[in-house]
Image (tube, grey):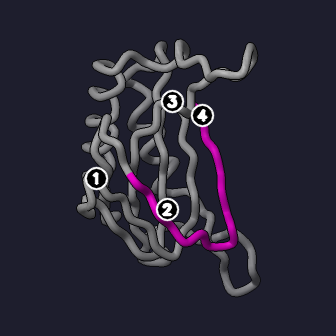
Amino acid sequence: MRLLIQRVLEAKVEVEGKVCGEIGKGYLVFVGFGAQDREELLPQAAKKLVELRAFSDEQGRLNLSLKDVGGSLLVVSQFTLYASLVRGRRPDFSPAAPPELAESLYDKFVNTLSQTEIPLQTGIFGADMKVSLVNDGPVTLSMEF
């Protein structure tokens, strides 16, 4: 499981010209699943994401969490996080989870996050999405489980 986390001032995702998820201050999180990923990873990943301290305190140190700043999450599925670029010039997606597994894990991850007190928005799994954001910092972090 890979997460690419961008600290944002605002972000939104559109499908077919309609906004399906939008947040103000918070994290835009792209999540991808590998073929070997299992459901047992999800609670740990959700806890680490929600408790991540990537907002600046008064001294400018990354010391504040989403809860501390009243932030939100926008979670978007992105299988391309598992693309291998080792050979050739075309990405190899064979390390990514098959769509059925990835969708099940994505839905369960979103459900786990929805049980926290952090406001949550999502994209639509498998859809052609248009994502826009205003990076804050910029701060971009990656996590792998």
Cα–Cα gap, marks 2 and 1: 20 Å
Instruction: Please give the label number shown on residue 144.
Output: 4
* Dot 1 crowding, Cα within 10 Å, few <14, some 14–19, many 20+: some
Residue type at numbered disc 3: Met
> What residue is shown with label 3?
1
Cα–Cα gap, marks 2 and 3: 17 Å
Q: Nearer the viewer, residue 93 or 52?
A: 93
Q: Position of residue 67 (x, y in %)?
A: 44, 70
Horizontal arrangement in the rendering, residue 87 relative to residue 26 (left or right): right
Instruction: Please give the label number shown on residue 27.
Output: 2
Q: Secondary structure at mark 2?
A: strand
* Dot 2 crowding, Cα within 10 Å, few <14, some 14–19, many 20+: many
Instruction: Please give the label number shown on residue 15.
Output: 1
Q: Position of residue 27 (x, y in %)?
A: 49, 62
Q: Residue at x 57, y 46 (%)?
A: 4
Residue type at numbered disc 1: Val
Q: Secondary structure at mark 4?
A: strand
Q: Residue at x 38, y 65 (%)?
A: 12
Q: Is residue 69 above or below residue 129?
A: below
Q: Is residue 96 above or below residue 143?
A: above
Residue type at numbered disc 4: Glu
Q: Position of residue 142 (x, y in %)?
A: 63, 45
Q: What is the magenta range?
A: 130-145
